[in-house]
Image (tube, rainbow, N blue to C red):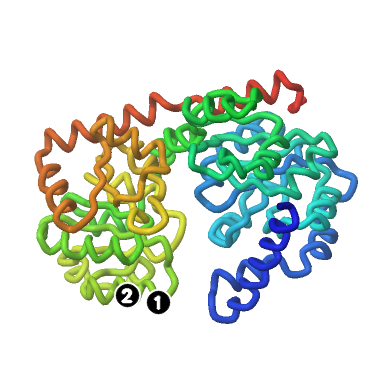
């Protein structure tokens, strides 16, 4: 199985190199790892211990950010290395002031794992939510370097828990401690012999609960919104945008702030084809006041504003639910507004909880979206759902404090 795993890693890397000339994300993935050892060797201070944080992408960075900030606050002289697997994380956060170095994670082959860990010489390592890399985990285990999984979550149908999943359970055995999001995950690991497990909750709550206090007022958005009720749609894809087009035709008294997941030119042009009269944030200063006053849709064609934009909303729509899964619902919920999303939410505990609390609403088609939106025109129902959303976020904060207590009590931070 180890041979098959390594072969799969090689083949995946080869595939990305083949399609890189034609695929922007693949190109970034490949270019970011080219000559990685030479570049890191010239950059990283040799002989220095580091704390290594790994994030799959941008969402996981935001999820683990509260722990990262806690360490930086209490130990400002500690050297921190951040790695990302995905370009969507690295390209946005490569200049973060929360780390001394930010890199792409080299491919998970034995040689890379040894060289990388030799370079950064970690005191301990923190992975967020998921990504279980055999060679990196094995190398850390062999060197007795503590490895923590924070905000981890598991499901019974995952390969780790199948009769043929022994190799993958071996990867889990390299983890020093699992900080779990929910009781089901705790029980699942314990049923399979793991005792180094504790329920802490999701560190994202600690991050998002602070967002309303840190929110930035954006003059252009304030002018666009004026006195109109606003739907803020975050991290949308084409399927979401088609539904939103139909919805806005039915509710002309509402305005829509649309922040797509991908902001490359092709996607923005596709959105403009759906909303021909829409404004683009990057071109806002060029619009006449009359056009701004009559515009119903504002397209956010940059990254980094979404967590403040939800503060303008009366309702929110979270994209991704017609693809591989919904994006971050908590950034909207913390502002006390109802959250609407597509049908693929079952891997996300917070989405299920929001639905149970009457704060989240899953839709499968245009008719269901219209029905939910119509129901929430009732201000009493909308305000109740929003209050439930905000209370849910506030009640689930606290995971970071538990993790920080563990880091102190185990002497990992000293």
SS state under label 2: helix
Where 401 falls versus 342 (above or below)? above
Q: For label 2, count other residues whose C-alpha is less than 10 Å away and answer few (under 14), some (14-19) or many (20+).
A: few
Seen at 17% across and 49% down, the residue is 229
Where is residue 87 shown, x and y percent of the image? 58, 62
Which residue is at the front of the view, 44 or 181? 181
Q: Which mark is residue 386?
A: none
- Element at badge 1? helix
| Residue name at image x 30 percent, y 54 percent | 233
Q: Is residue 350 left or right of residue 405?
A: left
Looking at the picture, tell me which residue is in the foreground, 7 or 83.
7
Q: Are marks 1 and 2 in contact (CB under 8 Å)?
A: yes
Q: Using residue 36 as the reference point, say whether residue 16 is left or right of it.
A: left
Pointer 1 residue: 266
**Residue 29's x, y, as percent?**
62, 66
The residue labelled by disc 2 is 270
Binning the other alpha carbons within 10 Å of mark 1 as few (below 14), some (14 to 19) or many (20 upward) gives: few
Q: In terms of depth relative to the viewer, which is nearer, 348 or 122?
A: 348
Q: Can you name the residue that lies furthest to the front here?
A: 163
Number of marks: 2
Asked if residue 159 can be seen in this view, the reply is yes
Q: Is residue 357 left or right of residue 43?
A: left
């Amino acid at each position: 199985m180890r041979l098959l795993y390594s072969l799969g890693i090689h083949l995946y890397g080869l595939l990305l190199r083949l399609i890189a000339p034609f695929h922007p994300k693949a190109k970034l993935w490949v270019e970011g790892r080219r000559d990685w050892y030479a570049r890191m060797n010239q950059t990283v201070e040799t002989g220095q211990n580091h704390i290594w944080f790994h994030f799959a992408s941008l969402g996981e960075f935001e999820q683990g950010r509260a722990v990262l900030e806690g360490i930086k606050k209490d130990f400002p002289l500690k050297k921190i290395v951040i790695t990302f697997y995905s370009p969507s994380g690295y390209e946005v956060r490569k200049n973060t002031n929360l780390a001394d170095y930010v890199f792409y994670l080299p491919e998970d082959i034995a040689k890379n794992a040894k060289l990388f860990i030799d370079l950064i010489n970690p005191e301990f390592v923190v992975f967020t939510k998921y990504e279980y890399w055999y060679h990196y985990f094995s190398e850390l285990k062999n060197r007795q370097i503590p490895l923590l999984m924070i905000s981890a979550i598991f499901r019974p149908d995952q390969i780790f828990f199948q009769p043929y999943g022994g190799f993958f359970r071996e990867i889990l055995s390299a983890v020093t401690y699992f900080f779990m999001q929910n009781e089901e995950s705790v029980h699942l690991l314990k049923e399979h012999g793991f005792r180094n497990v504790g329920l802490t909750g999701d560190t994202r709550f600690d991050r998002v609960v602070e967002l309303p206090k840190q929110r930035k007022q954006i003059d252009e958005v304030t002018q666009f919104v004026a006195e109109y009720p606003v739907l803020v749609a975050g991290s949308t894809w084409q399927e979401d945008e088609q539904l939103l087009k139909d919805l806005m035709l039915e509710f002309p008294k509402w305005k829509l702030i649309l922040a797509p997941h991908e902001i490359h030119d092709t996607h923005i042009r596709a959105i403009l084809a759906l909303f021909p009269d829409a404004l683009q944030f990057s071109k806002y200063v060029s619009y006449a006041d009359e056009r701004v006053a009559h515009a119903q849709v504002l397209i956010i064609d940059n990254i980094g504003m979404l967590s403040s934009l939800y503060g303008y909303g009366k309702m929110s729509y979270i994209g991704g639910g017609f693809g591989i899964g919904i994006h971050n619902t908590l950034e909207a919920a913390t502002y006390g507004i109802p959250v609407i999303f597509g049908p693929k939410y079952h891997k996300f505990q917070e989405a299920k909880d929001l639905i149970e609390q009457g704060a989240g609403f899953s839709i499968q088609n245009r008719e269901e979206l219209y029905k939910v939106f119509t129901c929430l025109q009732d201000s009493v129902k909308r305000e109740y759902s929003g209050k439930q959303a905000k209370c849910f976020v506030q009640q689930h904060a606290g995971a970071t404090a538990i993790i920080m207590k563990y880091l102190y009590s185990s002497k990992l931070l000293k």
